[in-house]
Image (cartoon, rainbow, N blue to C red):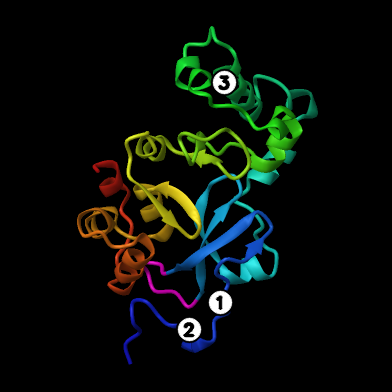
Amino acid sequence: MDTPEHPTFTHRARDLENQRFGKWTVLHRYYPQVKSKATYWTCRCDCGTVKPVMAPALVKGGSTSCGCARRTNKLPQSKVRSQENPLYRTWMTMKTRCYNSSHPSYKAYGARGIKVAPEWHDYARFAADMGERPTGHSIERIDNNGDYGPGNCHWATRVEQCSNRRNSRVVLLEGRSMPLSVAAREQGVDYLSLYMLVVKRGIEAHEAVRRLREKGSRFRERAAELK
C-alpha cells in the first residue's frame, strides 16, 4: 500500500502541537520531502528561529532550543556586555533608536513614540527573553507600531523584516499578528497560494492554511522573496 504524502496520526504519533519543550514551541506537524519513518514537528525557538525537530528529541529532552542557549553560555563573561557581543550590540542600538534624538533612526522610532518596555532596560532580562541573536537575523517588532518588549519581538531575517513594513499585509494566526509571508513560512505553505486565498478571496488565514495543507502545499523561500 502506498504511503500518503501527508500521513495521518493512525500510527498513534503523539500530538505535540502548541506544547513547550525548553525554548521550543511546537507549531504544527512537519512532513519531509523525502519519506521518513521519523515524526517531525515544526518548532519556533524563543529566539525566533523556526525549524523542524524530531519528535523523540523533543519528548526525551534531546533538543530544547535551536542552539542559541548553548552558544550564549560559551561567550566569555568579560564579553557579555561588550560591543563584540551581537546581542549586547542589538540591545544598545534598540535603546539608542528610541531615546537618542541625535541618532539617524530616531525619527522612525523614538519620534513615532516607539519605546523600550521597562523590563528590557535591564540587559539581563532582555537577554533571557530573546536568547542569542541567530546569524543573519536582527530584532523585529511583530506589531510595527508597538514597543520593543516581550511578546512583540522576535529574531527575523532581512526578507521577513521587509515583509513587516507598515504597509505590509498582516494576518491574525494562532493568536498572533504577523506578516503574511511570515505566516506562510511558519505554517510551511506556499506564500503565493496563501496570498491568493487571504487577500484576493478574503478567506481567514487559519482556514486558508488548513486548505493548503490538505493540498500538500509547501513553503518556497524564493516565492516569499518575490512577493
- Decide whether the magenta segment is chiefly helix, strand or loop: loop
Q: Above or below — where is 103 with respect to 11?
A: above
What amino acid is labelled 2 in the image?
Answer: Phe
The label on residue 15 is 1
Badge 3 crowding class, 10 Å Cα cut-off, few under 14, some 14 to 19, many 20 or more, is many
Question: Residue reaching furthest front?
Answer: 113
The magenta stretch is 31-37
* Quarter of the image with the C terminus in it: top left
What amino acid is labelled 3 in the image?
Answer: Cys
* Quarter of the image with the N terminus in it: bottom left
What amino acid is labelled 1 in the image?
Answer: Asp
Which residue is labeled 3 in the image?
98
Q: Above or below — where is 218 with respect to 5?
A: above
Dots 2, 1 in contact, CB < 8 A: yes
Element at label 2: helix
Q: In this view, does 51 lie to the left or right of 181?
A: right
Element at label 1: loop
Q: Above or below — where is 11 with respect to 76?
A: below
The alpha-carbon separation of the residues under discs 3 and 2 comes to 48 Å
Badge 2 crowding class, 10 Å Cα cut-off, few under 14, some 14 to 19, many 20 or more, is few
Which residue is labeled 2 in the image?
9
